[in-house]
Image: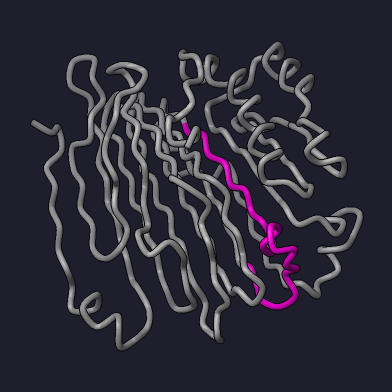
């Protein structure tokens, strides 16, 4: 029997989508721990955003899940909300099966809202594959992370401006982005950005410097040990994949932050995975185990 209690519903809003040409989707997940097993305790979705399945590829301690958006792409006016709660002692990792595609907006903004609530002595990893902003996309990404005293969070985001495979350049559109992390209600990390293709920061040497990929990896797990930080600073991306890559790591009292700017989403993810191999034994006490979906 599955660990989860699965509830599904279709709202009048969802039923009206074909006429409105937009989707409002919400997925709410609760993870709990029983004895030594982390498991999916609640799975509630409205609209086209679902959890494919909960898995335990590295044993009972960690519950893995794959978040799927069946339409395959997000159009202007669409809204995706992912709510995740972890109860006492639970450990969960969520990823996505492939790149997120954000289409030309046609005058309407597409939104993604992430709300993560982590209880005592929990650990949550949000490690999605890249998001691709098509030319003309108008996108808002918002993430709010709420941590109890002993909770630990690790999450990355990889953004591609334009479809590189088609040599598409992001010439029109906009990106609103914010990430806030609070511990016991106190704000410990806050990022805000607003970008348009014509903004000077897109070409500036202190900004994206004309690069099409911007990526961030943030961990909230307390002070990073000096030896862990030193090992992270020795890591380099595979520059053969991206000769223009610029990268680096830094720490604050409660935050580890890594950045990547370049031309290759593949190179950005390889760099972050290499850092993850070093960082996970520190913050989670476990070796890094790649989600199987990354191999497909």
Give left or right: position of 289 versus 132. left
Nearest the eye: 249 or 43? 43
Query: Split into 4 quadrants, where in the image is the N terminus?
Result: top left
Q: Point out residue 203 in the picture as x, y percentages from the top left corner.
A: 87, 63
Q: Is residue 294 above or below residue 84?
A: above
174 is within the stretch colored magenta:
yes
Give left or right: position of 130 versus 183. right
Q: Is residue 282 above or below residue 161?
A: above
Q: At x 59% / y 25%, what residue is drawn?
A: 276
Q: At x 79% / y 19%, what residue is drawn?
A: 234
Give left or right: position of 211 versus 232. right
92 is within the stretch colored magenta:
no
Magenta stretch bounds: 153-175
Q: At x 32% / y 58%, what residue is drawn?
A: 49
Q: Point out residue 146 in the picture as x, y percentages from the top left corner.
A: 42, 43
Q: Is residue 65 above or below residue 60?
A: below
Q: Point out residue 102 in the picture as x, y percentages from the top left corner.
A: 54, 66
């Amino acid at each position: 029997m599955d660990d989860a209690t699965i509830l599904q519903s279709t709202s009048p809003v969802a039923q009206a989508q074909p006429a409105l040409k937009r989707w409002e989707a919400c997925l709410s997940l609760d993870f709990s721990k029983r004895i030594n097993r982390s498991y999916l305790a609640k799975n509630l979705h409205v609209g086209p955003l679902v959890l494919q399945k909960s898995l335990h590829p590295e044993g009972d301690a960690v519950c893995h899940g794959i978040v799927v958006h069946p339409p395959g792409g997000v159009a202007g006016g669409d809204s995706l909300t992912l709510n995740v709660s972890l109860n006492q002692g639970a450990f969960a990792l969520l990823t996505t099966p492939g790149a997120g595609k954000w289409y030309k907006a046609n005058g309407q903004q597409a939104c993604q809202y992430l709300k993560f609530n982590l209880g005592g002595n929990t650990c949550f990893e949000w490690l999605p594959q890249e998001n691709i902003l098509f030319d003309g996309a108008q996108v808002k990404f918002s993430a709010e992370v709420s941590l109890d005293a002993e909770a630990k969070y690790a999450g990355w985001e990889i953004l591609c401006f334009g479809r590189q495979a088609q040599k598409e350049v992001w010439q029109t559109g906009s990106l609103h982005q914010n990430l806030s992390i609070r511990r016991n209600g106190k704000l410990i990390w806050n990022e805000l950005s607003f970008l348009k293709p014509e903004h000077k920061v897109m070409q500036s040497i202190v900004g994206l410097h004309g690069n099409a990929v911007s990526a961030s990896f943030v961990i909230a797990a307390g002070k990073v040990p000096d030896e862990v930080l030193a090992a992270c600073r020795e890591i380099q991306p595979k520059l053969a994949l991206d000769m223009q890559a610029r990268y680096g790591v830094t720490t604050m009292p409660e935050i580890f932050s890594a950045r990547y700017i370049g031309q290759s989403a593949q190179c950005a993810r390889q760099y972050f995975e290499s850092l993850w191999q070093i960082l996970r034994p520190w913050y989670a006490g476990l070796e890094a185990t790649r989600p199987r979906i990354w191999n497909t």
